[in-house]
Image (cartoon, helix red, strand yellow):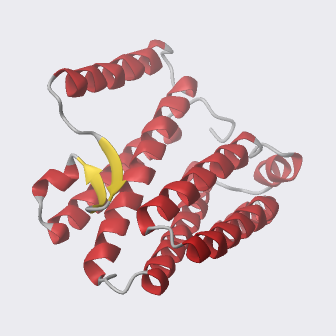
Amino acid sequence: MFKKLVLTEFEANKNILLIWLALNLVFFVYMTTIGTDLPIFIATTMMSYWVLLIIAVSISGNEKRVRLLVQLPVIPSQVFGAGWFFILFWLSLQVAIWAIYGITNSAEFTLAHLGQITTFACGMITFTIIIAIGIDLGTLRPAYVQWLYIFFMLAMLGVAIRYGIWFGIVGNEDGMHFYPIAFVENLGLEILLSFLLVAFLLATDFLVFRFSDNYLN
């Protein structure tokens, strides 16, 4: 059943994936021609990924998918897993394109750069999951829990600004970084902590989804 749900995710979003692939191809060829640095290529294609992801999420309730989920004996964990599998697999393809661009356009591209790209992608998905948790809390009772979460996130942002704590994903001539994880200054540990953070947030989002007031319960 899980496989069928995953295939349905790809089928429902195939047009968006084709647009994403076409945009990456155009940017790849154009930026290779003009000699654009890897960080700029990553920033440009990252925005196209996020915009198309938002579009994909906004139309995720299309008739075909809703009809399938209603008719099949699915459980929340299968629906949750299929959706995030699609998003993470899509992001892994984007990371592969970044790596190919780096290999073909920079003689200095190394495994360390690939590691930086990996942590950068983890930063991207971290913020995506944080937003997803906030959205999923909208169907959790009591309703004020969502507002508490939003207030907590804004408070954390305020503390970071007040004390000058870097928080976010940054790409420059020094490489691609995911702060505050990058303060560790040990690439292997950064990758491990990034994966652990993503796993923790996904588990949190699943708990919210599992106990929310959705049509699968």
Q: Can residue 30 be seen in this view?
A: yes
Q: Nearer the viewer, residue 25 or 32?
A: 32
Q: Where is residue 88 in the image (x, y as percent from the top left)?
A: 52, 63
Is 124 situated left or right of 181 in this image?
Answer: right
Residue at image location 17% in from the left, 29% down from the top: 164
**Residue 185, horizontal then vertical, whole percent:** 12, 60
- Figure quadrant of the N terminus: bottom right
Q: Where is residue 171 in the image (x, y as percent from the top left)?
A: 36, 55
Q: Which residue is drawn at 12% across and 66% down?
A: 186
Task: Residue 18: name its quadrant.
Answer: bottom right
Horizontal arrangement in the rendering, residue 170 relative to residue 5 (left or right): left
State whether residue 57 is above or below residue 115.
above
Q: Which residue is drawn at 30% across and 83% down?
A: 110
Above or below residue 200? Residue 175 is below
Q: Is residue 204 above or below residue 25?
A: above
Q: Where is residue 95 in the image (x, y as percent from the top left)?
A: 48, 70
So how many labels did they put on this image? 0
Q: Is residue 22 left or right of residue 64?
A: left
Q: Which of 60 and 14 is in front in this view?
A: 14
Q: Which residue lies furthest to the top in this view?
A: 144
Image check: 82 left or right of 183? right
Residue at 62 percent across and 38 percent down: it is 217
- Between 29 and 187, the one lying in front of the other is 29
From this viewpoint, is residue 84 visible?
no
Towards the viewer: 210 or 47: 47
